[in-house]
Image (tube, rainbow, N blue to C red):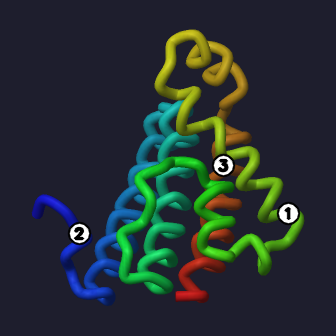
């Protein structure tokens, strides 16, 4: 399938949900194999795709092709319902998408991601993903 923008709304939401669930499973697999950099990256992807699923609930327009969690949260209006802890977590996840891609950040990021931090990222990702899914 080339694009999901031409699917009916429920199918578009399901597409993003399935991709998010796959990414969450991948994040857990990365933890098991001690690929901590990718745990953070995949946690970001989980939340990004759930925000895009929520976008599809609200609009016939396809989601913005952006990776900024804070911007997606704002554009969907979910920011008006989030707790301070959820905002803080979005802020913590935000750089894990971009910084994982560039060598100048990669080494520094790898040093900050250990098993305990990754377990916490997964726990918080799971909490936020359940919260967003309940809004769908």
Residue at 66% over, 31% down:
113
Q: Nearer the viewer, mark 3 or mark 1?
A: 1
* Most distant residue in the left direction: 1
Q: Nearer the viewer, residue 23 or 59?
A: 59
Element at badge 2? loop
**First in residue order: circle 3 vs circle 1:** 1
Give neighbour class at mark 1: few <14, some 14-19, many 20+ (Cα, 10 Å): few
Q: Which residue is mark 1?
A: 85
Give how far across and how far down residue 126 sits, in percent. Answer: 61, 66
Residue 100 to residue 103: above or below? below
Residue 37 to residue 29: above or below? above
Residue at 72% over, 40% down:
117
Element at badge 3? helix
Q: Nearer the viewer, mark 1 or mark 2?
A: 2
Residue at 20% over, 80% down:
7
Q: Is residue 113 left or right of residue 47?
A: right
Element at badge 1? helix
* Most distant residue in the top direction: 104
Q: Which residue is mark 2?
A: 4
Q: Which residue is mark 3?
A: 119
Q: Is residue 87 left or right of residue 74?
A: right
Tell me the CA gap for discs 3 and 1: 17 Å
Whether pointer 1 and pointer 2 mark residues with C-beta atoms closer than 8 Å, the reply is no
Q: Is residue 24 left or right of residue 77?
A: left
């Amino acid at each position: 399938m080339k694009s999901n923008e031409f699917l009916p709304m429920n199918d578009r939401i399901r597409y993003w949900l399935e991709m998010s669930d796959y990414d969450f499973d991948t994040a857990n697999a990365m933890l098991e194999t001690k690929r901590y950099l990718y745990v953070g990256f995949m946690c970001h992807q989980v939340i990004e795709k759930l925000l895009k699923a929520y976008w599809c609930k609200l609009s016939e327009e396809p989601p913005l092709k952006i990776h900024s969690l804070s911007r997606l949260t704002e554009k969907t209006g979910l920011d008006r319902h989030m707790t301070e802890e959820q905002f803080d977590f979005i802020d913590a996840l935000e750089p894990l998408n971009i910084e994982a891609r560039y060598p100048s950040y990669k080494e520094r990021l790898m040093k900050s991601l250990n098993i305990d931090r990754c377990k916490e990222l997964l726990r918080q990702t799971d909490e936020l993903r359940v919260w967003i899914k309940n809004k769908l």
